[in-house]
Image (tube, grey):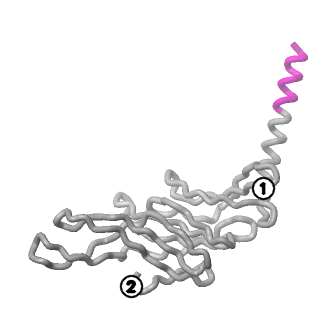
Amino acid sequence: MWKSLGWIVGILALVAMGATLACSAKYSAQNNGLIVVPSRADNVVQTFSLNLGNGSVSQINNPNFPYLNGFLTSVTLHPTASVAYVLILQDPASPGSMTGIEVSQIASDGKLAGPTLVSLNNETVTVSVSCDGNTTETIGVQPVAMTIDSTCNYLFVADSATSDTCSNPVPGAVSVFSISNGSLTEISGS
C-alpha cells in the first residue's frame, strides 16, 4: 500500500512541477511564437506563448485588456508581431456595440495594449435597384475576413455578399486600409 501511495505522490509532484513551469513561461519574440485568439464567449482577446523549441504553450496574462463589446470573429497579426487587428461585429443585443477593427499594440512581453476601434459601422455599398423604378440604394456591408498584403502597407477587409430591398443579390466588397505605424486609414473609394 505504501508503495502505491509513493507512486501517486511522485506522479502528483511531477505534474505540479510541470504546471508550475508551464505557467511561469515567459514570451520572447526571438524564441517563441505568439498566438492571439479572440474569445467569443468572454469578449476578450487572449494571447499565448508558443515555445518553438519544444512546442509547449503557455497563456500570457493580459489583465489590462478590456472587454470588447461585440462579436469577435478573427485576428490578423502584422508580420512584425507588433500589432494585432481584431475584427469585431456589432451585437444587436448589446447596447453600444459597433462593427469595426480593434487595433492593439503588442508589447515585447506578448501582452496586448488597450485597443483603438476603427469603426466600420458606416461602411456601405451603393447599388442600382430595378424593382422600384431604377433608383439607387445604399446598403451596409458586413466584414467577414482580413489580411495584410506582402508589403505590410495595406489591410484588406472582405465584406460579405448581401441583398437589396428587392432581394436582388449584391456582391461582396473589399475595404482597403493603409497601415502606418500600426494605425489604419481607409483608402478613399475602396
Please provide percent x and percent y for residue 131.
Answer: 12, 70
Q: Amino acid at mark 1?
A: Leu
Query: Residue lying furthest front in this view?
Result: 150
Q: Earlier in the sequence, mark 1 or mark 2?
A: 1
Q: Which residue is mark 1?
A: 52
Q: Quadrant of residue 160?
A: bottom left
> For this view, does 190 lie left or right of residue 179?
left
Q: Residues within 10 Å of mark 2 (few under 14, many from 20)?
A: few
Task: Name the residue rendered at 18%, 67% in the picture.
Answer: 165
Please provide percent x and percent y for residue 60.
Answer: 70, 57
Task: Name the residue rendered at 76%, 48% in the picture.
Answer: 56
Q: Quadrant of residue 70?
A: bottom left
The reply to whether residue 13 is visible in this rendering is yes
Q: CA distance from mark 1 to mark 2?
A: 42 Å
Q: Residues within 10 Å of mark 1 (few under 14, many from 20)?
A: few
Q: Is residue 158 above or below residue 16?
A: below
The reply to whether residue 96 is visible in this rendering is no
> For this view, does 108 lie left or right of residue 169?
right
In the picture, which quadrant includes the C terminus?
Answer: bottom left
Q: Which residue is mark 2?
A: 189
Q: Is residue 64 above or below residue 4?
A: below
Please provide percent x and percent y for residue 189.
Answer: 38, 85
Task: Name the residue rendered at 53%, 80% in the picture.
Answer: 184
Considering the numbered disc 2 on the image, is that residue within a helix, a strand or a loop? loop
Query: Residue lying furthest top in this view?
Result: 1
What segment is highlighted magenta in the picture? 1-12
